[in-house]
Image (tube, rainbow, N blue to C red):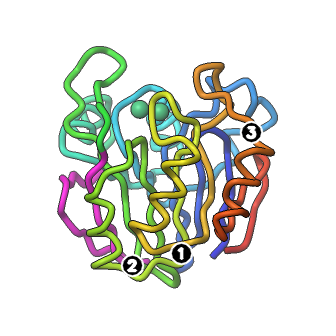
Amino acid sequence: MRLTFYGHSCFAVEAGGKKILFDPFISGNPLAAHINIEKIEADYLLLSHGHQDHILDAESIAKRTGAKVISNYEIVMWFAAKGISNYHPMNIGGMLKQDFGQIYYVNAVHSSGLPDGSYGGNPGGFVIRAEQKFYFAGDTALTLDMQLVAEHHQLDFAVLPIGDNFTMGVDDAIRCCELINCNRIVGVHYNTFPYIAIDVEEAKNKFRDAGKELFLPAIGETIEL
Ligand code: NI
Ligand code: MN
């Protein structure tokens, strides 16, 4: 499966011939200044939670591409009120079948307020089942709920936050690998802001010493997983 990283927690995968974009935060990320948002294609736009650093460019991308916006009910309705008509609300524990495969919206331990102070429901992550199966944790603490992901899904890879402070850091992301029974990790949500600055070499060493693969694609880079 091809995965393109757009910085922070934003990435896209291609599944079943469709492009699925997650948590777009590009125009507000100086590290992603070289990314041309207008060129990003999307058939589906999946939003883990309501924080600005996960939804900033969702409205413009959804309106330009017509991508279907999928998130929790409160977030989806917030975008519907902005004139987005292609959407599908979910909530934690739910599964949604689409043409490329299945989407599961799973628990995250975090918060989810929308930028204007609106209630953003509960934060979540996603499991996608298509040619490959993967887990995008969203913003979350390490939580035993992750064991349920491993019970239900044999993951090929996972996209996990590693920046600490607001989410799991490197050590908890490595513990998460055990809970989800998956050792191929794409690290996200680090180094965008001073609060989530990490020592990248140390992170790589810790994952290697734990026998896990850590992928840290450059912003704009596409990797094959
Ligand atoms: Ni957040
Ligand atoms: Mn965040």
Provide the secondary structure element on which disc 1 rests: strand
Q: Which residue is mark 1?
A: 15
In this rendering, is residue 175 above or below 17? above
Question: CA–CA distance between discs 3 and 1?
Answer: 22 Å
Residue designated by label 2? 101
Amino acid type at image mark 1: Ala
Taking 114 as reference, is 168 left or right? right
Could you tell me which secondary element the residue under label 3 belongs to?
Answer: loop
Q: For numbered disc 2, what is the local secondary structure?
A: strand
- The percent coordinates of residue 190 (x first, y second) are 63, 36
Residue 101 vertical placement versus 31 (above, below):
below
Query: Which of marks 2 and 1 precedes in the sequence?
Result: 1
Residue 1 position (above or below residue 35)? below
Question: What number is the disc on residue 36?
Answer: 3
Q: From which residue to which does the magenta span run?
A: 87-108
Would you say the residues marked 2 and 3 are in contact, meaning their CB atoms lie under 8 Å apart? no
> Callout 3: few (<14), some (14-19), or many (20+) C-alpha neighbours within 10 Å?
few
Q: Position of residue 47 (x, y in %)?
A: 39, 46
Tag 1 and tag 2, C-beta contact below 8 Å: yes
